[in-house]
Image (tube, rainbow, N blue to C red):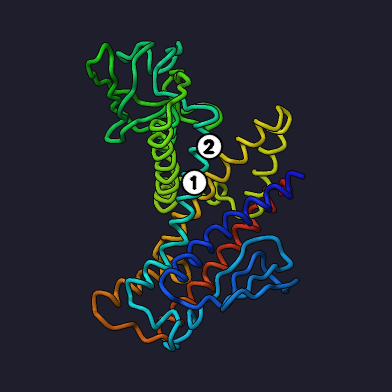
Amino acid sequence: MSIIVAILIFGILVIFHEFGHFTAARKNGITVNEFAIGMGPKLFGIRRGETEYTLRLLPIGGACMMQGEDSGEDTPGSFNSKSVWARIAVVFAGPFFNFIMAYICAAIIIGMSGYTSAQVTKIVDGYPATQSTLEPGDLIVKADKTSIHNFMDFRYHIMLNQGRQTEITYKRDGKKYKTTITPVKTDDGTYVIGIQGGVNIKPGPAGVLSQSFFEVKTNIDMVIKSLEMLVTGQVGKDDISGPVGMISAIGSSYSEAAKYGARTAFLTVLNLILLLSANLGVMNLLPIPALDGGRLVFLIIEAIRRKPIPPEKEGMVHFAGFVLLMGFMVLVCFNDITRLLGV
């Protein structure tokens, strides 16, 4: 059951992404030849107007196939017949819909369970925070230059800054104060300063909307920071997971949550969709050929120079990028499998 849930989550994420492209394409008068749910051989399809809606064999992913998208065709209704700004909107809509999905999940989670504030509840003996001016009851509002809106913001900042000295701004009795703390590394490799915190708050409708935005922002920031750490060598290949590793992790999380009832399992699935949807949105916007971000780079260049890059040259770049991405995915999947098998 856990593997089925994991596959369904991946399917939902990709379908919603493709639905973003589909919606923007239709809005801009671009012909969508096929909107597919799943991949591989077609099981059946229904044609409505100019679009065939199909269900395919493999329940992972989907596709929005627009007329002339991968060719130089500029006939009426084709992708290339539209203005560069219309095409930018269509390409950007996929990642944007992933951010929308993340926001919807965050709103449901906070609406049902509230959020955890960044209030300090305890200073743990033997850790760096005991040497600071922090006290129980203080509300953390900033870590270095990062605004803190909930306790998860603060935990991620400490964890991802890899032991660097942190300037903490906090409120006490309506006044702001600052203190500096250097985290220490625990046996499991996590960086901590030795505070426990968080008071559960159930916000009203306006609070749900604002806190949901901050929740999505935190997840996006975490993905970007993780990519920075990968580029700078602060994390290695053993810290990276591909589809195999993520399916395993999702399955394990769901199985564990299911022990505590349907509500906990539901909230866990929403949290996973939130995290993965934000991740997918960011990753697709990277300026890498074959990804939406790579296509946006070519479109932005076209908008600046007021004429398109020759389709054959752009196609060669995207093909090369696709080959490199597939090679990277093979390596990551191999890493996942060897890790799961304990090799």
Residue located at (71% from left, 49% from top) = 343
Q: Secondary structure at mark 2?
A: helix
Residue located at (39% from left, 30% from top) = 207
Disc 1 target residue: 102
Q: Quadrant of residue 53?
A: bottom right
Position above or below: 297 against 317: above
Please state which of the two labelled residues, at mark 1 or mark 2, is closer to the viewer.
Answer: 2
Q: Amino acid at mark 1?
A: Ala
Which one is in front, 240 or 198?
A: 198
Q: Secondary structure at mark 1?
A: helix
Labelled disc at residue 108: 2
Residue located at (30% from left, 29% from top) = 142
Label 1 environment density (alpha carbons within 10 Å; few <14, some 14–19, many ≥20): many
User: How many marks overall?
Assistant: 2
Residue 309 rendering spot, x and y as whole percentages: 34, 83
Q: Quadrant of residue 166?
A: top left
Residue 274 rendering spot, x and y as whole percentages: 52, 44
